[in-house]
Image (cartoon, rainbow, N blue to C red):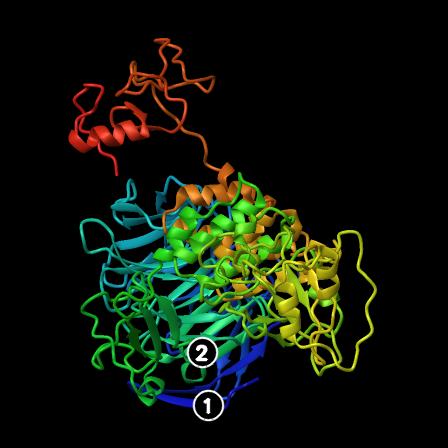
Amino acid sequence: MEKMSRVTTALGGSTLTGRTMHCHLDAPANAISVCRDAAQVVVAGRSIFKIYSIEEEQFVEKLNLRVGRKPSLNLSCADVVWHQMDENLLATAATNGVVVTWNLGRPSRNKQDQLFTEHKRTVNKVCFHPTEAHVLLSGSQDGFMKCFDLRRKDSVSTFSGQSESVRDVQFSIRDYFTFASTFENGNVQLWDIRRPDRCERMFTAHNGPVFCCDWHPEDRGWLATGGRDKMVKVWDMTTHRAKEMHCVQTIASVARVKWRPECRHHLATCSMMVDHNIYVWDVRRPFVPAAMFEEHRDVTTGIAWRHPHDPSFLLSGSKDSSLCQHLFRDASQPVERANPEGLCYGLFGDLAFAAKESLVAAESGRKPYPGDRRHPMFFKRKLDPAEPFAGLASSALSVFEMEPGGGGMGWFVDTAERYALTGRPLAELCDHNAKVARELGRNQVAQTWTMLRIIYCSPGLVPSANLNHSVGKGSSCGLPLMNSFNLKDMAPGLGSETRLDRGKGDARSDTALLDSSATLITNEDNEETEGSDVPTDYLLGDAEGEEDELYLLDPEHAHPEEPEYVLPQEAFPLRHEIVDTPPGPEHLQDKADSPHVSGSEADATSLAPMDSSFSLLSVSHALYDSRLPPDFFSVLVRDMLRFYAEQGDVQMAVSVLIVLGERVRKDIDEQTQEHWYTSYIDLLQRFRLWNVSNEVVKLSTSRAISCLNQASTTLHVNCSHCKRPMSSRGWVCDRCHRCASMCAVCHHVVKGLFVWCQGCSHGGHLQHIMKWLEGSSHCPAGCGHLCEYS
């Protein structure tokens, strides 16, 4: 799609007028070159060699230089150059090693002038001297450069680069006798045309072949080079050694580089493959192109600025068989697409935020970051208006500092170091981790560990002292989950809030409040909170009232004169008929307190209706032994782990995953587990918890995680006695036959963790060495070396 912008430029006595336009060629182009008056352009390739006139609205074909019935390899061009002093003189580099000159002033149809056939392989580049009309330089794949005098029929000098191939040659604009050449091995050489025996200077410019170079039109010593390493480098050649001034990182191999006229720091590049666009870079801002042309649909093979003093027009040829004129005003600017917002946490917990100044100014309460304490390295400072690029995608930086003493991560380190993940029964692991979390003030995490213990551990592991530990002490507590029966499976009448009503004369002040929706209790005085099947009295009420009630009696604090109401062990008696006028609670209390009441009478009395609204049933054993299987809670545990992970607490997610093992691992997909493990290990390594990190890696079941500690495990050590490298067969030296793992302090063989000095190779037990270095900095082996352990 053509853009209709038009620019008119006055250059001395001439005027350049044009717009963005393109024309279709008969074949792909390999190179282009512009004549001195910027009115014509020559396009050369393997199957095309034409001259086009650059009109105001379009390209017009003027001359086809491929004449003759039989196509010749001399016309298969790899490069073309138009002399800047003689508008009738052209030179081409052929793929068969021939250098051809063309005279457009010849009256005949065939404009070919001279053929130079001295190169043995493809000629990659030809270049005219900027001031000498008859001097032509060529660089070939055979590794030689030749200088031709067009007044003679052969070369006047040959330059050997001692390399496989020459990719580019360019005469210096300011130095009359100097030219630069680039090579396949990454070197750049500077030659004096008068001394063909050796180069004046040579340096390695790129990691790989250097495909192109271009001298700066204004600065005498600046040379731009581009290579296969996707970099464009600007070198200062005026110093004793070539100095790299600027480096631009592109996304593909750089095929062509051309300085932009009248703009000291701008240059244009195109790529050899992958990328079809043409970029104009400001070398002072190497990460974002200043302009980008996107008209071509295939690799761009040649670029040239239309006039040496006009920065507005750029010509290009491509393998998509098109010739384009680009107007700089119509170029897209990638900086406009750049995201001016950024967010990052600092080492000390500060939050740095960069955004457009307009957005920051609209927000109240934000203060610009002064930059005098800990300036973030990842944000560019706010530019001064006098500096380059001021106003182009500039951002204002703000920093939100943490409150003093807040946001610390000490709990993370303590938790990681104190958690127990393996080596004990599941109940002990859950209790230990719950205790650690509770001591660190993480009550929700502690409660989660307690719930996991109740769900997955078998009943009967908790002593009876742990049940109702604080009942009757005036402290608020709850009821542990009763493994002996499930409230959900009980009669629907056992619900809502229940309370314990005392009869007249009941001197006990203890009360317990039970919510049917709460299934566990936070027991502050005991670590173990799981229910037990030890005998405990439960009074179950069942009557015709509006709500049924559940009562809990504490057998440890029962009235000394009040007998324990229990059912016969063998069975439940049949339920009695409810009478209209039951005796009151006082009657039951008096009868129960009487010493003349027998056991059977007491049992019968316990079944007597106490009131018209309720009756009491005393249970000393579980109603039935059924429990919900642990798999019943798998979905709940899975959702709990995902909740912690989404909250950022991957430590809890991974720890539960390791402790529960196969009980829950099968319900979480492998990719999610691997993501949790990776995140937790990364956090551990950030806090330098190497041992904990290694333990987590070792306990994981994911292949991608378990192999993390299998890489880079080889240590190359020397014997501490004879300094000879140790073999892989053991810790006994092959030369002196002494054990290398002897502790320098206790002189015993180290069978566990071994630490040694990299300077003198002596070492020993970790604790022994640490204790020794607390009092002395010299090696305990007596070698005199100043050892250091940090």
Q: In this view, does 468 lie above or below 359?
A: above
Q: Considering depth in this image, is 662 or 161 the residue closer to the camera?
A: 662
Q: In the visual, does 335 lie left or right of 244?
A: right
| Dot 2: element | loop
The residues bearing labels 1 and 2 have C-alpha atoms spaced at a distance of 22 Å
Residue identified by numbered label 2: 337
Q: Which mark is residue 5?
A: 1
Whether residue 578 sits left or right of residue 358 in the image: it is right
User: Residue 405, image x and y in percent?
Assistant: 27, 65
| Residue 244 found in image quarter | bottom left
Give the side of residue 428 with respect to residue 34, left or right: right
Q: Give the residue at x 55% y 70%.
A: 109
Q: Residue at 28% of width from left, 41% of height from top?
A: 198
Q: Which of 603 and 542 is in front in this view?
A: 603
- Check if mark 1's residue and mark 2's residue have beta carbons within 8 Å: no
Q: How crowded is mark 1: few (under 14 residues within 10 Å), some or many (20 or more)?
A: few
The residue mark sitting in front, 1 or 2, is 2
| Residue at 75% across, 52% down | 569
User: Which one is earlier in the sequence, the residue at label 1 or at label 2?
Assistant: 1
Spot occupied by residue 397 in the image (x, y as percentages of width and height): 30, 76
Label 1 amino acid?
Ser
Task: Kindly tell me whether residue 178 is visible in this rendering.
Answer: yes
Count of numbered marks: 2
Q: For the residue marked with disc 2, what is the amino acid?
A: Arg
For mark 1, give the secondary structure. loop
Residue 251 % position (x, y): 47, 62
Residue at image x 80%, y 55%? 571
Q: The N terminus appears in which quarter of the rendering? A: bottom right
Closest to the observer, 89 or 312 = 312
Work out whether residue 116 can be spotted: no
Q: In this view, does 132 lie above or below 775?
A: below
Residue at the extreme front of the image, as rendered = 596
